């Protein structure tokens, strides 16, 4: 019997994945997962020992090309990862919400983002799926670790993962845009104009800029910080003791408001933030001074909340598999069962309420007045169970330079960038004309090589004086 043990180890010690292949005569066992856990095991049997050895060699080679390397099991400590302890009781609502379609991701899910044409959902197995608004699955991103949350910054979409990395999913080649220190047990993330804000288990707020460099950190009054939202005026942070606003430059706390219960989720609109609490409430706080403007009362602990544009309607999901809708002033308009677990995250768009639930499903609810009225009277549509397509595209992040497609010439309209050495660090600058060559480019650190040139589909300027990549990345010969 032979065993090969590999680990994915990258700069900053941020990767915490292992891959172990064992060959015993005709059998090949593959065990993989997060370092410090037993992981998952897959077993296969082959007609001959030679074919078993060949299959094992192929699997090992694939991982080595992705950046895995031989290691000693137990030499590296596991990254601290806390899963939210959630329970989900049956709903006490008399009627069920009008669910149009449901997609089961296969693992518990917190991450959701809904844009004009697509829905995104990420689960604790590291899968991120995109679906169109009718529920058809379009693509799958396979990330190295469980997805904590999905956040959008303009038209860039990011996945914060348990491995401490935040992956940019805006193109077919996802890449790690940020790498969070290994002593940070991540709870929630937000990104505003390229600046990453991290809330963690210990009640600390950490801010990292677009170059993946630490800017400032500040402890809160509590712990278990499940809320962080940011805009140009402040960073809004919620933990077991309440909600605070911090100056975006780290200059200090602007205000702090104690909440009725520990904060379990946060949402923001232009002038207010919303905190869902363990004491069955959503509280709306004025961004200007932290004053409580309205309270939305539920019947169980609030796991998630969202609003329609401007806060005209406020939605909440509780620990008893119910979903609520309130008027802006706090009047409860309706309460319905989800029909499939408690909503751990949610988003409203165009009279549809999208939920991710404790059973790992992305659920689309018809939240129009007519559909809700019919549901309250016991009439709901037959929910369509969305299936994965057999030939679904799967995209994995590039962890080494060798994983990037090489081209001999830059296509028409593409932009050329170059890796340069600056004070001992490898930065990326624009070579093509029409751009400010002094600005840095937010670029995957794992594939940077001094002197190397890359081709990208487009660059977009961001506040703070840097460029973001839009589209595919290819290496230029």
Image: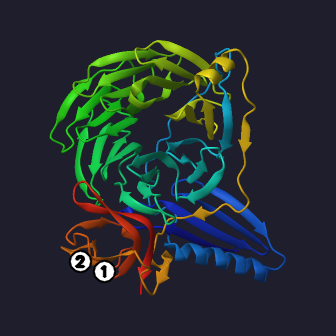
Q: Are marks 1 and 2 in contact (CB under 8 Å)?
A: yes
- Answer left or right for 52 relative to 294: right
Location of residue 229 in the rendering, given as x and y in whole percent from the top left corner: 34, 38
Location of residue 225 in the rendering, given as x and y in whole percent from the top left corner: 37, 35
Q: Nearer the viewer, residue 222 or 206?
A: 206
Residue at label 2?
A: 421
Location of residue 343 in the rendering, given as x and y in whole percent from the top left corner: 56, 31
Q: Up-down: is 282 above or below 393? A: above
Location of residue 74 in the rendering, given as x and y in whole percent from the top left corner: 49, 61
Q: Quadrant of the C terminus?
A: bottom left
Q: Quadrant of residue 76?
A: bottom left
Q: Nearer the viewer, residue 249 or 125?
A: 249
Marks 1 and 2, how far apart at CA: 6 Å
- Answer left or right for 116 relative to 425: right
Q: Check disc 2: other Cα within 10 Å, few if <14, some if 14-19, many if 20+.
A: few
Residue at label 1?
A: 450
Q: Quadrant of residue 101?
A: top right
- How does the figure colour the protein chain or chains? rainbow
Q: Up-down: is 379 above or below 127? A: above
Q: Check disc 1: other Cα within 10 Å, few if <14, some if 14-19, many if 20+.
A: some
**At numbered mark 1, what does the secondary structure look like: helix, strand or loop?**
loop
């Amino acid at each position: 019997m032979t065993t090969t043990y590999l680990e994915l180890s990258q700069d900053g010690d941020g990767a915490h994945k292992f891959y172990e292949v064992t060959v015993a005569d005709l059998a090949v066992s593959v065990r993989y997962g997060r370092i410090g856990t037993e992981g998952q095991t897959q077993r296969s049997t082959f007609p001959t020992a030679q074919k078993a050895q060949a299959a094992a060699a192929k699997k090992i080679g694939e991982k080595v090309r992705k950046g895995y390397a031989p290691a000693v099991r137990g030499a590296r400590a596991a990254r601290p990862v806390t899963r939210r302890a959630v329970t989900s009781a049956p709903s006490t609502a008399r009627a069920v919400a009008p669910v149009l379609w449901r997609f089961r991701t296969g693992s518990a899910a917190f991450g959701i983002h809904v844009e004009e044409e697509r829905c995104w959902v990420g689960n604790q197995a590291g899968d991120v799926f995109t679906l169109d608004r009718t529920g058809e699955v379009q693509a799958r991103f396979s990330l190295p670790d469980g997805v904590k949350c999905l956040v959008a910054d303009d038209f860039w979409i990011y996945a914060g993962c348990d491995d401490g990395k935040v992956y940019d999913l805006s193109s077919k080649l996802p890449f790690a845009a940020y790498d969070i220190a290994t002593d940070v047990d991540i709870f929630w993330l937000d990104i505003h104009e390229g600046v990453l804000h991290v809330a963690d288990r210990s009640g600390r707020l950490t801010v990292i800029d677009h170059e993946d460099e630490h800017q400032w950190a500040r402890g809160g009054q509590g712990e278990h910080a499940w809320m962080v939202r940011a805009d140009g005026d402040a960073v809004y942070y919620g933990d077991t003791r309440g909600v605070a606003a911090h100056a975006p430059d780290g200059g200090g706390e602007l205000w702090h408001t104690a909440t009725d219960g520990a904060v379990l989720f946060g949402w923001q609109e232009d002038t207010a933030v919303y905190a869902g609490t363990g004491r069955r409430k959503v509280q709306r706080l004025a961004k200007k001074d932290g004053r409580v403007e309205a309270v939305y009362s539920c019947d169980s602990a609030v796991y998630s909340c969202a609003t329609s544009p401007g806060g005209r309607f406020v939605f909440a999901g509780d620990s008893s598999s119910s979903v609520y809708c309130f008027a802006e002033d706090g009047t409860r308009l309706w309460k319905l069962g989800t029909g499939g677990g408690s909503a751990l995250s949610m988003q409203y768009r165009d009279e549809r309420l999208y939920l991710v639930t404790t059973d790992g499903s992305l659920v689309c609810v018809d939240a129009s007045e007519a559909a809700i009225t019919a549901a309250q009277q016991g009439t709901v549509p037959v929910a369509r169970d969305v299936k994965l397509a057999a030939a679904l595209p799967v995209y994995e992040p590039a962890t080494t330079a060798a994983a990037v497609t090489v081209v001999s010439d830059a296509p028409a309209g593409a932009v050329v960038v170059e890796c340069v050495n600056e004070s001992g660090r490898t930065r990326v600058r624009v070579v093509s004309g029409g751009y400010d060559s002094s600005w840095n480019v937010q670029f995957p650190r794992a594939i940077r090589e001094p002197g190397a040139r890359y081709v990208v589909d487009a660059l977009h300027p961001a506040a703070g004086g840097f460029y973001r990549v839009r589209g595919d990345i290819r290496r230029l010969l």
